[in-house]
Image (cartoon, helix red, strand yellow):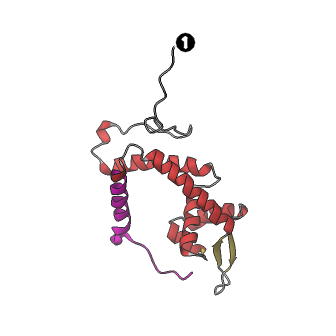
């Protein structure tokens, strides 16, 4: 019996794709359109991220809610909608799901009887830690074709673009 060659190292293997992720390489004719290439790539990233978060029972916008509450503290639903860029109506459904899981709780606002403040629970903080782990896995899988220095450069460029277009900003101060 002939011995088989050892399997390729983990780094050389193509990452396994979740079965519900649709992906094809960008057609050559579209490579000159930077905006469309970014759209194409973010579609795949969103699919992978969504599939990863689904493994722990969360939707990507729910992770955003948990992270904002963790970083910025309890806030009213209007502020949360603005900070996460989630419309108010869908936010209510997302919060209902998070509340059912015991990850957030809504309490009456101390200064506005018409409003509620949304609070992150200890269970929500623990789930956010799980989401952080899944995010690291998905990030490693998605960015595998890039060298570490390229990943850092891409992150820096995207962060700069995401935070520099003040002409388009609709942010307003909103008491929470």
Camera sees residue 57: yes
Residue 164 lies, with reference to residue 148, above or below; the image says below
Outermost bottom residue? 111
User: In the figure, is residue 85 to the left or right of 161?
Assistant: right
User: In the figure, is residue 14 to the left or right of 19?
Assistant: left
Task: Determine the secondary structure under disc 1.
Answer: loop
Crowding around mark 1 (Cα neighbors within 10 Å: few <14, some 14 to 19, many 20+) is few
Residue closest to the eye, 132 or 94: 132
Circle 1 residue? 1
> Which residue appears at 29% of the width and 47% of the height?
33
Q: Magenta stretch mostly in which secondary structure?
A: helix
Q: Does the magenta stretch include residue 36?
A: no
Residue closest to the eye, 164 or 156: 156
The mark total stands at 1
Q: Residue 98 at x, y = what percent?
A: 67, 62
Residue 68 lies, with reference to residue 141, above or below; the image says below
State the extent of the magenta-drawn residues as a range. 150-176
Residue closest to the eye, 114 or 9: 9
Q: Residue 8 at x, y = what percent?
A: 46, 31
Q: Residue 141 at x, y = what percent?
A: 47, 45
> Which residue appears at 31% of the width and 41% of the height?
30
């Amino acid at each position: 019996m002939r011995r088989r060659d050892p399997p390729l190292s983990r780094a050389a293997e193509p990452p396994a794709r979740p079965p519900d992720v649709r992906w094809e390489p960008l057609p050559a004719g579209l490579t000159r359109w930077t905006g469309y290439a970014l759209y194409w790539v973010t579609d795949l990233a969103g699919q992978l991220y969504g599939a990863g978060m689904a493994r722990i029972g969360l939707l990507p916008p729910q992770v955003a809610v948990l992270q904002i509450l963790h970083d910025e503290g309890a806030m009213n639903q209007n502020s949360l909608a603005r900070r996460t860029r989630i419309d108010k109506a869908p936010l209510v459904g997302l919060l209902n799901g998070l509340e059912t899981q015991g990850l957030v709780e809504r309490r009456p606002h101390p200064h506005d009887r018409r409003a509620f403040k949304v609070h992150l629970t200890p269970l929500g903080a623990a789930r956010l830690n799980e989401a952080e782990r899944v995010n690291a896995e998905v990030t490693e899988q998605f960015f595998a074709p890039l060298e570490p220095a390229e990943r850092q450069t891409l992150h820096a460029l995207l962060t700069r673009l995401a935070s520099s277009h003040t002409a388009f900003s609709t942010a307003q101060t909103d008491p929470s």
